[in-house]
């Protein structure tokens, strides 16, 4: 199974707050069968310890190490918001829920960081008109 599937990319997310955005990204991971619902609670535990805001409109909420047993498979969910969400004083337009088996999330995070470190790439993701375009722009996350 690929880490990122087309059905886990949502353009026009409905959340208006940081907490609702975490729930939205977490729910997509649960719906994909990648994590148990307890993992979403651990995403809040992580956020309350350290912000998952990464810069360039990106937040990557993920669970704590204690939630490892709640992960069934490595997966991503990507939610894009038309209006920025206030993430502890920072503007976020992309919330990427992540779950990684056996520390696979570290490699996935590094691939995401490369894309989101380039303002031109972020603009392409903002301008993308379909989930397929976003999928194509982020396709490297599925490569070994």
Image (cartoon, grey):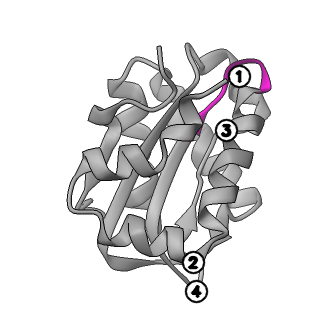
Q: Secondary structure at mark 3?
A: helix
Residue ID for mark 2: 119
Q: Which of the 4 quarters of the picture holds residue 56?
A: bottom right
> Residue at (60%, 64%) from the top-left corner?
116
Q: Is residue 68 left or right of residue 5?
A: right
Q: Secondary structure at mark 4?
A: loop
- What residue is disc 4 on? 89
Answer with the quarter of the image where residue 71 lies: top right
Q: Is residue 33 above or below residue 134?
A: above
- Mark number for residue 84? none
Residue bounds of the magenta highlight:
98-103
Q: Relative to 31, is 14 above or below? A: below
Q: Residue furthest bottom?
A: 89
Residue carrying label 1: 68
Label 2 Cα crowd, 10 Å radius (few <14 / some 14-19 / many 20+):
few
Nearer the camera: disc 4 or disc 2: 2
Whole-number angstrom distance, CA of label 3 to CA of label 4 = 26 Å
Q: How far from the left and from the top, in percent, is residue 90? A: 57, 83
For label 3, the residue is 108
Mark 4 vs mark 2, CA separation in Å: 20 Å
């Amino acid at each position: 199974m690929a880490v990122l599937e087309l059905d886990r990319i949502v353009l026009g997310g409905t959340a208006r707050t940081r907490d609702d955005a975490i729930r939205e990204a977490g729910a997509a991971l649960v719906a994909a069968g990648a994590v148990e619902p307890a993992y979403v609670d651990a995403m809040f535990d992580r956020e309350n310890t350290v912000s998952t805001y990464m810069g360039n409109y990106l937040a990557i909420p993920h669970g704590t190490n204690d939630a490892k047993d709640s992960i069934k498979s490595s997966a991503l969910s990507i939610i894009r918001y038309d209006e920025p969400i206030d993430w502890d004083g920072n503007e976020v337009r992309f919330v990427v829920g992540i779950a990684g088996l056996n520390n696979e999330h570290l490699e996935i995070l590094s691939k995401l960081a490369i894309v989101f470190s380039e303002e031109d790439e972020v603009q392409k993701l903002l301008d993308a008109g379909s989930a397929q375009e976003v999928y194509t722009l982020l396709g490297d996350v599925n490569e070994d």
